[in-house]
Image (spheres, rainbow, N blue to C red):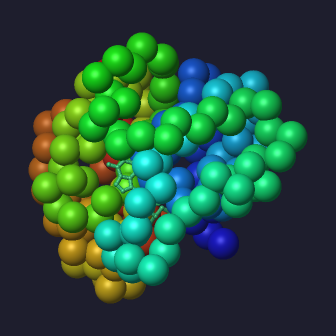
Amino acid sequence: MVELEKHSEIVRNCKMGVVEIGILNGDTTKILAQANPAIPVYGIDPLIPDSMNPDLIGSEENIAKNMQGLKNFYFIKDFSYNVIKNWDKAFDYLLIDGSHIYEDVRKDFEDWFPKLAPGGLVSFHDSTMNRGGEPYWEGPSKCADELIYDPRVDLVGSVARLTIFRKKQ
Ligand SMILES: C[S@@+](CC[C@H](N)C(=O)[O-])C[C@H]1O[C@@H](n2cnc3c(N)ncnc32)[C@H](O)[C@@H]1O
């Protein structure tokens, strides 16, 4: 899948670490952790019903299965807005895929962006619906559209449902 290939390419070039907000069962996280075993991958998720589909709930069992043997993966079972309060670990890739409600997506970005290394990348899943992408999802799409004009970042590009930005040095 083209998004997973893009994640892998990004993570192979990372030097510090990766944070994924919203991991569900860790399907994407597994790809991130496999792409660069030399750096830590932090997956943050309280495992609540998904904001797009309440029938979808991740489980620790599925996460453990996906992450079997991957020693660079760290699961943090909590809300992103709690975890950021005491965060002290370096990372140069941030994948935002938690709550898809606009205010929550924006908060995830504003909370976590200051901790992202200068020159690091931040991507939003389900964020291309106003730019020719699939119809997922209003919140992340609005947030990504706004950031195109934000002086703190440069738009790197879109891949399928993913929009990627670079934090300016
Ligand atoms: C769309 S799913 C994630 C899919 C996953 N990234 C993947 O590629 O398979 C959204 C997840 O976000 C989680 N979530 C919701 N609010 C969150 C928050 N404030 N912090 C972290 N995760 C959150 C939900 O529990 C759910 O598992």
Question: Quarter-wise, where is residue 169 in the image?
Answer: top left
- Side (left or right) of 64 relative to 141: right
Image location (x, y in percent) of residue 151: 14, 37
Q: Is residue 131 above or below residue 144?
A: below
Q: Nearer the viewer, residue 37 or 168?
A: 37
Residue at 57 percent across and 22 percent down: it is: 16
Q: Can residue 14 be seen here?
A: no
Residue at 35 percent across and 40 percent down: it is: 80
The N terminus lies in which quarter of the figure? bottom right
- Side (left or right) of 103 relative to 45: left
Return the residue found at the far right.
Answer: 69
Image location (x, y in percent) of residue 96: 39, 50
Q: Nearer the viewer, residue 157 or 126?
A: 126
Quarter of the rendered image showing ligand 1: bottom left
Image location (x, y in percent) of residue 39: 67, 26
- Side (left or right) of 74 relative to 145: right
Q: Can residue 3 be seen here?
A: yes
Q: Nearer the viewer, residue 98 or 47?
A: 47
Return the residue found at the far top.
Answer: 88
Residue at 63 percent across and 33 percent down: it is: 74
- Side (left or right) of 81 relative to 72: left
Image location (x, y in percent) of residue 109: 26, 42
Question: Quarter-wise, where is residue 10 in the image?
Answer: top right
Q: How many marks?
A: 0
Question: Quarter-wise, where is residue 120 in the image?
Answer: top left
Residue at 37 percent across and 30 percent down: it is: 83
